[in-house]
Image: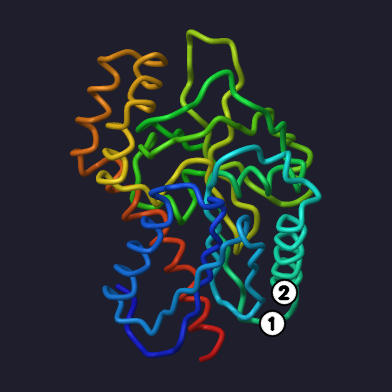
C-alpha cells in the first residue's frame, strides 16, 4: 500500500467505445475506485467521450488511461477526434521530454494501443482472419520479465483478449530508434502459420500499452461469454471444450482476477510515486 496523503491526483479516462455497449469503462472505474479507497487518496477521475463527441482532456491531468473500442484503427486516420487525440499525445510526450520533474503517465488499451503502434510505425496493423476472443495466455518477452507493471504475474499470465485487429511483424529498428520495448506476444498457435501479435509495449518510461484488456474482470467477461454471438464465435474458433474451459477459468483467482488486480494498479503505483517525489 502507498502511504496515504491528500495531495490531489487527477486521472483522465478517454473513452474510445463510440457509444458501443462495453465492460471496459466499468472495469476502469472499479479499478480506480478500489485503488483510491485502498490508498486513501485524493484521486479524481474525469471521463472524455473521444470518438463520440471529440472530447479531449487538456494536459493538466497527472494520469491518462485510454480505452479500447470497436472498429478499424486505420479508417479513423485524419478524422477530427483522432487529430485532437494525437495532438494531445504529442503534447504529453513533449512534456515528458522536458525538464519538468512531474511527468504524465499514460496507459493504452487495445484500440488505443493499435493507434499508437500505427502512429509510431512499430509494425503492421491488420485485420485478423477471425476474432480473437476469450481468456487467453499472454507470453512475456525477456523485456517483459523485467517490466514493473507485470510484477506479480506468471509467464504466461492470463487476460481477456477481444479484437478483430492486430499488430504483427515488429520493426526492430523502429523499436531501437525510439527506445521502446516489446513486452509480450500472443500465444503460439502451432496449427497455423501466422505471425504472433504484439500484446504489450513500453512506449517510454512513462507510457505503456496492452493489446489485451487488463481492466477486465470475471463478472464482465462472463456477461460477454454468455451472449449468443460471442458464445458461437468462441465455439467455432476453439470448440465447446475450450468455451467451457473459459467459463471455468473465470473462477480461477490466478487468471484474469490476478491480472486485473496487478497491471493497472502497478502502473498507478509508478505514477503516484513519481507525482509525490516531484513535489517533495
**Location of residue 153 with respect to 49 vertically, above or below:** above
Secondary structure of residue under mark 1: loop
Residue at x-position 38% and y-position 39%: 159
Closer to viewer: mark 1 or mark 2: 2
Q: Quadrant of the N terminus?
A: bottom left
Check disc 2 and report the residue beneath it: 95
Colour scheme of the rendered structure: rainbow
Percent from the top left, x then y, of residue 122?
73, 40
**Location of residue 53 with respect to 273 vertically, above or below:** above
Percent from the top left, x then y, of residue 192?
53, 10
Check disc 1 and report the residue beneath it: 100
Residue at x-position 24% and y-position 24%: 245
Dots 1, 2 in contact, CB < 8 A: yes
Residue at x-position 37% and y-position 30%: 134
Q: CA distance from mark 1 to mark 2?
A: 7 Å
Percent from the top left, x then y, of residue 131?
50, 25
Q: Is residue 151 left or right of residue 198?
A: left
Q: Is residue 222 left or right of residue 16?
A: left
Mark 1 and mark 2 lie on one chain; the one further toward the N terminus is 2
Q: Quadrant of residue 157 in the image?
A: top left
Residue at x-position 47% and y-position 27%: 132
Amino acid at each position: 500500500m502507498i502511504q496515504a496523503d491528500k495531495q490531489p491526483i487527477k486521472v483522465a479516462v478517454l473513452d474510445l467505445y463510440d457509444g458501443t455497449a462495453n465492460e471496459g469503462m466499468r472495469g476502469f472505474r472499479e479499478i480506480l475506485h478500489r485503488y483510491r479507497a485502498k490508498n486513501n487518496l485524493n484521486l479524481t477521475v474525469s471521463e472524455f467521450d473521444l470518438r463520440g463527441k471529440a472530447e479531449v482532456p487538456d494536459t493538466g491531468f497527472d494520469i491518462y488511461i485510454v480505452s479500447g473500442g470497436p472498429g478499424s484503427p486505420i479508417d479513423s486516420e485524419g478524422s477530427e477526434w483522432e487529430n485532437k487525440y494525437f495532438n494531445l499525445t504529442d503534447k504529453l510526450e513533449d512534456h515528458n521530454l522536458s525538464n519538468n520533474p512531474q511527468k504524465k503517465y499514460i496507459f493504452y488499451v487495445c484500440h488505443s494501443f493499435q493507434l499508437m503502434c500505427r502512429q509510431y510505425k512499430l509494425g503492421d496493423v491488420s485485420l485478423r482472419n477471425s476474432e480473437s476472443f476469450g481468456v487467453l495466455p499472454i507470453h512475456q518477452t525477456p523485456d517483459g520479465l523485467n517490466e514493473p507493471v507485470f510484477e506479480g504475474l506468471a509467464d504466461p499470465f492470463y487476460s481477456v483478449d477481444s479484437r478483430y485487429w492486430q499488430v504483427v511483424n515488429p520493426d526492430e529498428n523502429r523499436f531501437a530508434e525510439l527506445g521502446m520495448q516489446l513486452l509480450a506476444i500472443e500465444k503460439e498457435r502451432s496449427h497455423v502459420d501466422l505471425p504472433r501479435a504484439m500484446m504489450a509495449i513500453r512506449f517510454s518510461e512513462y507510457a505503456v500499452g496492452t493489446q489485451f484488456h487488463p481492466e477486465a474482470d470475471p463478472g464482465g467477461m462472463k456477461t460477454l461469454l454468455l451472449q449468443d454471438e460471442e458464445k458461437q464465435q468462441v465455439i467455432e474458433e476453439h470448440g465447446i471444450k475450450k468455451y467451457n474451459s473459459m467459463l471455468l477459468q473465470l473462477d480461477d483467482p490466478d487468471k484474469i482476477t490476478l491480472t486485473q488486480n496487478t497491471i493497472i494498479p502497478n502502473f498507478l503505483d509508478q505514477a503516484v510515486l513519481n507525482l509525490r517525489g516531484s513535489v517533495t
